[in-house]
Image (tube, grey):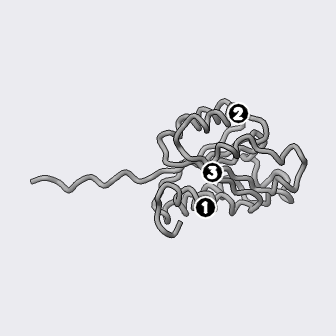
Amino acid sequence: MSGSPAAPARPSVLLLNGPNLNLLGERDPAQYGTTTLADVERRVTALGEELGVTVTCAQSNSEGALVDHVHAARAHQAIVFNPGAYAHYSIALRDAIDAIPTPCFEVHISNVHAREEFRHTSVIAPVAAGCIIGCGVLGYELALRAAVGHIGGRATA
């Protein structure tokens, strides 16, 4: 008697956060709100369950560790990434994202275009599959929906 065929592996998305986002909820609440990174991770993980994807969360203040996470993301179907200030000058992160086939969706909580001029340019954006900017922490959920839609997720994405 043979068993039923194995269920296909569930798609997965890496939720990656860069420098200072570990202080979310404490750092400059007028700019970033009072929601913590743990709150964001819980909300995005729960939404992932609804959309039929597994969400894995990681955060680092170190550029090299973030590059390592991006390289490891080849095991995922998409990345939702808030690179923080590294978005504006990290060629290493840009090159890492460009080097892998996994689509990356860039997220920024604040409207970087309404802030200091040095924040107006992202070196990540040209190699990102999409960018969500200025929607507060809701931007993470919007980016997950975009990622799921991109990888052929449920129609509700």
Decide if residue 9 is on the left or right side of residue 77.
left
Q: CA distance from mark 2 to mark 1?
A: 24 Å
Q: Identify the element where label 1 is drawn.
A: helix
Looking at the image, do the residues carrying marks 3 and 2 touch, with CB atoms under 8 Å apart? Answer: no
Q: Which residue is mark 3?
A: 105
Q: Identify the element where label 3 is drawn.
A: strand
Q: Nearer the viewer, residue 17 or 71?
A: 71
**Who's the residue at 47% across and 41% down the image?**
75
Can you give x and y, in whole percent of width and height, for residue 127 in the image? 65, 43
State which quarter of the image contains the N terminus. Answer: bottom left
Decide if residue 92 is on the left or right side of residue 29.
left
Check disc 2 and give the amino acid type.
Answer: Ser
Q: Which residue is mark 1?
A: 43
Can you give x and y, in whole percent of width and height, for residue 122 in the image? 76, 44
Q: Identify the element where label 2 is drawn.
A: loop
Can you give x and y, in whole percent of width and height, for residue 59 in the image? 65, 42
**Who's the residue at 66% across and 30% down the image?**
64
Circle 2 Cα neighbour tier, 10 Å, few/some/many (<14 / 14–19 / ≥20)? few
> Which image quarter: residue 63?
top right
Mark 3 or mark 2: which is in front? Answer: 3
Q: CA distance from mark 1 to mark 3?
A: 17 Å
Identity of the residue furthest to the left in this view = 1
Decide if residue 67 is on the left or right side of residue 123.
left
**Who's the residue at 67% across and 35% down the image?**
93
What is the number of the mark on residue 62? Answer: 2
Query: Disc 1 or 3, which lies upstream in sequence?
Result: 1
Circle 3 Cα neighbour tier, 10 Å, few/some/many (<14 / 14–19 / ≥20)? many
**Who's the residue at 62% across and 34% down the image?**
96
Can you give x and y, in whole percent of width and height, for residue 82 in the image? 69, 48
